[in-house]
Image: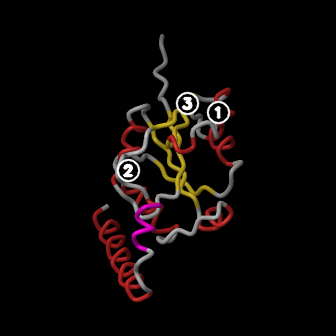
C-alpha cells in the first residue's frame, strides 16, 4: 500500500504594498506542492532587518491569508524561525525570491531550497521610491485608501 504524502512548501516575506510580483511568487510556489505556508514578517522583525513597512503587520497577514494560493499564513518573528517551522510543519520545499539567492542554502540538508525569479518591472522598493515623493498629507490619504482596501478584502473573504 502506497501512502500519498502531501508536499508542503514554505516561504517568508514582508508583503508590504502587495503587488503582482508577490502574487506571482505565491502562485509559482503553490505549484511546487500541495500546501503553501507563508510566513509574514512582523513589524518588530522588519525593524531588526532595517525595514519599515507602510502597511501594518495585521493588514499584511490578512491580505496574504485572503490569497487563494495560500493555505496558511503565520507570523515571522526572527531569522531562526525558518528551521523551526520546517520541522514543525513537515516542510519539503523552502522557496523564496532570487534576491535571497545563496542566503538559505544551509537549509538544503533538510528541504529542497528554491530561489524564484522576480517579476520584472515591479518591486516594493521601487514603489516606495515613487511614494517617497508624496508629502504627509498624501501619505495619510494613501493609508486611508489601504485601510479601505483591507476592509474590502476582509468583507470579500
Residue highlighted by disc 2? 21
Q: Which residues are magenta?
A: 125-131
The C terminus - image quarter? bottom left
Distance from Cα at disc 3 to Cα at disc 1: 14 Å
Would you say 30 lies left or right of 103 here? left
**What secondary structure is the stretch in magenta mostly built from?**
helix
Residue highlighted by disc 1? 105
- Given this view, does label 2 or label 3 mark the residue nearer the observer? 2
Disc 1, SS: helix
Disc 2, SS: helix
State the residue lying farthest toward the right: 80
Q: Earlier in the sequence, mark 3 or mark 1?
A: 3
Q: Quadrant of residue 141?
A: bottom left
Would you say 84 lies left or right of 120 here? right
Q: Earlier in the sequence, mark 2 or mark 3?
A: 2
Distance from Cα at disc 2 to Cα at disc 1: 23 Å
> Residue 53: image x %, image y %?
52, 68
Mark 2 neighbour class, 10 Å CA radius: few under 14, some 14 to 19, many 20 or more: some
Residue highlighted by disc 3? 92
Disc 3, SS: loop
Would you say 93 lies left or right of 79 here? left
Residue at point 43% right, 61% down? 126
Asked whether the beta carbons under mark 3 and mark 1 sit within 8 Å of each other, the answer is no
State the residue lying farthest toward the top: 1
Vertical relation: 28 (above or below) 23: above
Q: Earlier in the sequence, mark 2 or mark 1?
A: 2
> Residue 155: image x %, image y %?
30, 68
Amino acid at each position: 500500500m502506497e501512502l500519498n504524502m502531501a508536499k508542503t512548501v514554505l516561504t517568508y516575506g514582508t508583503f508590504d504594498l502587495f503587488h503582482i510580483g508577490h502574487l506571482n511568487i505565491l502562485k509559482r510556489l503553490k505549484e511546487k506542492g500541495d500546501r503553501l505556508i507563508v510566513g509574514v514578517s512582523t513589524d518588530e522583525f522588519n525593524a531588526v532587518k532595517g525595514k519599515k513597512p507602510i502597511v501594518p503587520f495585521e493588514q499584511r497577514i490578512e491580505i496574504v491569508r485572503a490569497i487563494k494560493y495560500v493555505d496558511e499564513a503565520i507570523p515571522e518573528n526572527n531569522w531562526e524561525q525558518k528551521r523551526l517551522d520546517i520541522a514543525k510543519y513537515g516542510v519539503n520545499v523552502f522557496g523564496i525570491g532570487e534576491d535571497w539567492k545563496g542566503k538559505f542554502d544551509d537549509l538544503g540538508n533538510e528541504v529542497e531550497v528554491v530561489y524564484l525569479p522576480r517579476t520584472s518591472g515591479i518591486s516594493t522598493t521601487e514603489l516606495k521610491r515613487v511614494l517617497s515623493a508624496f508629502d504627509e498629507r498624501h501619505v495619510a490619504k494613501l493609508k486611508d485608501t489601504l485601510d479601505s482596501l483591507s476592509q474590502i478584502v476582509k468583507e470579500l473573504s
